[in-house]
Image (tube, rainbow, N blue to C red):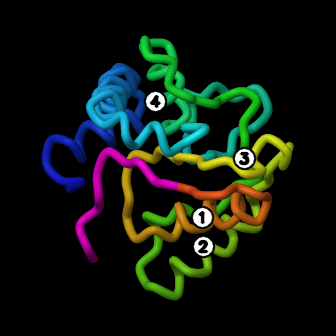
Amino acid sequence: MKAGTLENCIWQLKDGAYGWGMIFARIVLGHLYANPNLVRQVNAIIPMPAYRTPGEPRQGNDHAGYVIERAMEEDDQALPFVLDPPLIIKASATKRMRDTSSAAERQAVAQQLYASLQVPDPVRVSGQSIMVYDDVFTGGHTLNAVAKRLKVNGANKVYGLTLARAQWR
């Protein structure tokens, strides 16, 4: 659950305590190493796409990308991480899901997110099974929007991998 110490650490990463990115990367790697059956099912492990202005570092706004970047540096089992060039991008800023307060609002934000997502090279996605990493799973709207965009562009399957699940509102 996204609560207590874990929630505080996630917020610290988002507030600039980037050392947590390495710790979360080691947790992700440990989970994937301990569960090779999960990795065998996928061709690519990618971060949840984040909108970044040109030249903006991952540390600024792309927390999931930063964790995956750190995981790639530490990985000694050649897991199928894909970061650059990205398989999917978020081309414009959207309202954050955590700033919503109703199901209707979350659905509207998910539609806005879906419209902002682009797959730069559909050939790289076609027929692939892709695992999308994010720090927190709240209600599935964000992951569903990304999965839908990837599948519309030919992905075979899309899986989610998160550090924590938010408590139900």
Amino acid on which the number 2 mark rests in the picture: Val
Q: Name the residue under label 1.
A: 95
Question: Hey, what amino acid is under mark 4?
Answer: Val
Q: Which residue is drawn at 41% across and 79% down?
A: 101
Measure how far apart labels 4 and 2 are at the Cα level: 24 Å
Q: Mark 4 Cα within 10 Å, few/some/many (few <14, many 20+)?
A: many
Real-space Cα separation, disc 2 to disc 1, in angstroms = 6 Å
Label 1 vs label 4: CA separation? Answer: 22 Å
Q: Distance between the residues labelled 3 and 1?
A: 18 Å
Q: In this view, does 135 lie to the left or right of 158?
A: left
Are the residues flagged by discs 2 and 3 in contact, CB closer than 8 Å? no
Which label's residue is closer to the chain start, 1 or 4?
Answer: 4
Numbered range of the magenta stretch: 159-169
Cβ–Cβ below 8 Å for labels 2 and 1? yes
Give the residue displayed 54% in from the left and 42% down from the top.
42
Return the residue at label 4.
Answer: 67
The reply, left or right, for residue 126 in relation to residue 70 is right
Q: Is mark 4 on a helix, strand or loop?
A: helix
Going from N to C along the chain, the mark reached first, 4 or 2, is 4
Judge from the rendering whether residue 153 lies leftward or rightward of residue 8; answer left or right.
Answer: right
Local packing at callout 3 (Cα closer than 10 Å; few below 14, some 14-19, many 20+) is: many
Main secondary structure of the magenta stretch: strand
Q: Disc 3 designates what residue? A: 88
Mark 3 and mark 1 in contact? Answer it, CB < 8 Å. no
State if disc 2 and disc 4 touch (CB < 8 Å): no
